[in-house]
Image: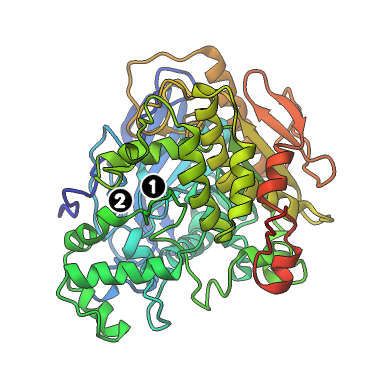
């Protein structure tokens, strides 16, 4: 298979997580070579392979099943084409397939995987030794992150969810970075083909899942980070009615920084023009046709060092991601949240919805600085402010760089609001406390507060569907990304994923505490109960997870032990997420400096 990865495009999986392979709810792989399983689907025959989960539960895996035609040559940058009916048997014996081409964000990994433009495949994991009667099993469809530019379906092994939750889990690839989200500010160019890939995958699942024993009328989409943003976006598209029925958004929802800004799209076109033989002066359609002939390696190299739109301040802007295309996304999706009369909001509010976060989502801040050192993007950032993030994240960096950059990204230039935010997250204790205040600010602004806004919008006067909120606070034994600085404390962004999945890069030489295992089993039960019944709790769950409502705002804290609390971060919400009525009414978010 052709290697599409340039020197600055990572072969490596970004996660370094502790393995739970040795524990009873995480997979010890043992393929059963006695027989394979052949399934006849409306699309054609698919072969799967039995394996034993922890010497007890059998699972059938179907890996590398195509859901669309390969987006290569003339189909590069185009909407996905239906796969139709195939003649050959599909499915591979390996436990993973190639990912889509992607850029390097500086994340450190231990596993080398392959990338290919022929990547529009999905993986199905079915509980049991035999395929059950049609419509027997609820289905959970996982949408991976990160930042619309990295990740693959094969990073996540959902065996614990499948075996203990008795559900089908499906993971799939979708096109990333410029291959999935090329925005040239021109209506002639498809801008959101990565989202169209997701729609195509969901349609294929709807049409074929019964052949695997799945119920097409009981489908839950769930995702993390940008994958959760995608899940939320899909839930705001009425065209998807019937393709899924429940949503779990983990550490990500539609927010003020979910869309690519026009100025960043212009810079992408400029970079591609400068580093390829395609003229910037050509009409957009001709420019794209020219890019179709450029090797994928060269395209990725052209943009890989400019993934972050860096200025003097740290921003939350995206280079690649969803954008308004007047088809899938007709205006900023934030408009829809509180416009309860629009079809988009009505569809979202008809779906049962779980959303939650970790307690320190802002770990992304120190990771951004650490990882970017290797890419020479922040080569002088720490020296400019005379600090090392390994030692501290001082208040002057928060006040002069982080807060102004984040506020400008989310609310445009509002110096008085920036001043208030910087003051709110200031502590005279300095050192460790101030550093953790800085990362908390980043997470509160970018993930936590938008999540609460989505929960309020979904639950307000809503008798059609249920709403649930969670918060994960259990510290991971081996956090995601680069090793955290000594001052960092809490559960960071992505740190909870090991509780649901075994990830491809997990080392095998670390033991876990019993309380990690116990919480993992409880989370699996909550998630799969919700997928099956719309209620995370049942008679076997020790703590009943209360429904979220705008008044009490009750949520569950996933730690050891699990507890129920109410009204997460009210003061932070008051700063970052004022009432959206003016935004909906005027078409712009009216965040007054005096708030």
Relative to residue 316, is residue 89 drawn left or right?
A: left
Quarter-of-image position of residue 522: top right
Disc 2 to disc 1: CB gap under 8 Å: yes
Q: Decide if residue 387 is in sight here.
A: yes
Looking at the image, residue 65 sits to the left or right of residue 545; the answer is left
Q: How many residues crowd around disc 1 within 10 Å: few (fewer than 14), some, or many (20 or more)?
A: many
Q: Which mark is residue 153?
A: 1
Position in image of residue 98 (x %, y %): 27, 49
Q: Residue 361 at x, y = what percent?
A: 53, 37
Q: Which residue is painted at 35% across and 74% down in the image?
A: 78
Q: Residues within 10 Å of mark 2 (few under 14, many from 20)?
A: many
> Residue at position x 66%, y 72% from top?
587
Point out residue 273 in the picture as x, y percentages from the top left corner: 22, 73
Q: Front-most of 93 and 330? A: 330
Q: What residue appears at the point 46 percent right and 22 percent down from the top-left corner?
A: 487
In terms of sequence position, does the residue under pointer 2 or pointer 1 come before the other? 2
Q: CA distance from mark 2 to mark 1?
A: 7 Å
- In this rendering, does residue 531 appear at all? no
| Residue tagged 2 | 99
Q: Residue at x 48, y 31 (%)?
A: 495
The x and y percentages for residue 570 are 74, 40
Q: Nearer the viewer, residue 135 or 150?
A: 150
Q: Secondary structure at mark 2?
A: loop
Q: Nearer the viewer, residue 150 or 429?
A: 429
Note whether 275 is above or below 35 in the view shown: below
On screen, residue 452 versus residue 42, left or right, reads: right
On the picture, is 116 further left or further right than 45? left
| Residue sticking out furthest to the bottom | 283
Secondary structure category for the residue under label 1? helix
């Amino acid at each position: 298979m052709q290697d599409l990865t340039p020197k600055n495009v990572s072969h490596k999986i970004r996660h370094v997580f502790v393995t739970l392979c040795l524990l009873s709810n995480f997979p010890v792989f043992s393929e059963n070579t006695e027989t394979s399983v052949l399934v006849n689907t409306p699309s054609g025959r698919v072969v799967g392979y039995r394996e034993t989960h922890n010497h007890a539960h059998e699972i059938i895996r179907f890996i590398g099943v195509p859901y669309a035609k390969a987006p290569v040559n003339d189909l590069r940058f185009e909407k996905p084409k239906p796969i139709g009916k195939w003649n050959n048997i599909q499915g591979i014996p390996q436990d993973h397939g190639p990912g889509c081409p992607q850029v390097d964000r500086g994340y450190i990994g231990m596993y080398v995987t392959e990338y290919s433009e022929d990547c529009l495949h999905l993986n199905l994991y079915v509980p049991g030794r035999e395929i059950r009667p049609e419509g027997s099993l609820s289905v959970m469809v996982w949408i991976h992150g990160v930042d619309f530019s990295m990740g693959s379906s094969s990073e996540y092994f959902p065996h614990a969810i499948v075996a203990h939750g008795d559900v089908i889990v499906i993971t799939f690839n979708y096109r990333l970075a410029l291959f999935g989200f090329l925005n040239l500010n021109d209506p002639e160019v498809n801008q959101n083909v990565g989202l169209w890939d997701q729609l195509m995958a969901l349609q294929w699942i709807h049409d074929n899942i019964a052949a695997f024993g799945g119920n097409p009328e009981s489908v839950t989409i769930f995702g993390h980070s940008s994958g959760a943003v995608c899940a939320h976006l899909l839930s705001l598209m009425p065209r998807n009615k019937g393709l899924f029925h429940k949503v779990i958004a983990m550490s990500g929802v539609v927010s003020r920084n979910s869309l690519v800004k026009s100025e960043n799209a212009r810079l992408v076109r400029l970079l591609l023009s400068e580093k390829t033989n395609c003229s910037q002066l050509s009409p957009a359609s001709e420019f794209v046709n020219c890019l179709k002939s450029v090797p994928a390696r060269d395209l990725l190299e052209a943009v890989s060092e400019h993934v972050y739109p860096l200025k003097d301040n740290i921003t939350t802007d995206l280079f690649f991601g969803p954008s308004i295309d007047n088809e899938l996304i007709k205006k900023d999706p934030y408009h829809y949240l509180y416009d309860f009369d629009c079809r988009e909001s009505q569809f979202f509010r008809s779906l049962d919805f779980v959303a939650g976060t970790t307690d320190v989502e802002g770990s992304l801040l120190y990771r951004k600085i650490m990882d970017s050192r290797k890419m020479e993007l922040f080569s002088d950032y720490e020296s400019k402010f005379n600090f090392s993030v390994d030692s501290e994240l001082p208040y002057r960096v928060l006040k002069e760089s982080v807060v102004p950059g984040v506020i400008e990204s989310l609310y445009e230039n509002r110096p008085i609001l920036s001043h208030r935010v910087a003051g709110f997250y200031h502590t005279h204790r300095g050192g460790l406390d101030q550093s953790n205040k800085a990362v908390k600010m980043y997470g509160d602004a970018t993930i936590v507060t938008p999540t609460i806004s989505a929960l309020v919008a979904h639950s307000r006067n809503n008798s059609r569907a249920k709403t649930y909120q969670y918060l994960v606070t259990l510290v991971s034994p081996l956090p995601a990304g680069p090793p955290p600085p000594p001052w960092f404390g809490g559960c960071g962004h992505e740190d909870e994923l090991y509780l649901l999945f075994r990830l491809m890069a997990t080392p095998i030489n670390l033991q876990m505490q019993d309380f990690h295992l116990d919480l993992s089993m409880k989370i699996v039960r909550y998630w799969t109960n919700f997928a099956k019944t719309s209620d995370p709790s049942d008679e076997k769950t020790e703590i009943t997870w209360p429904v979220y409502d705008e008044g009490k705002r009750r949520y569950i804290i996933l730690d050891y032990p699990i507890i129920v609390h109410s009204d997460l971060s009210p003061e932070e919400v008051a700063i970052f997420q004022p009432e959206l009525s003016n935004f909906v009414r005027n078409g712009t978010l009216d965040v007054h400096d005096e708030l």
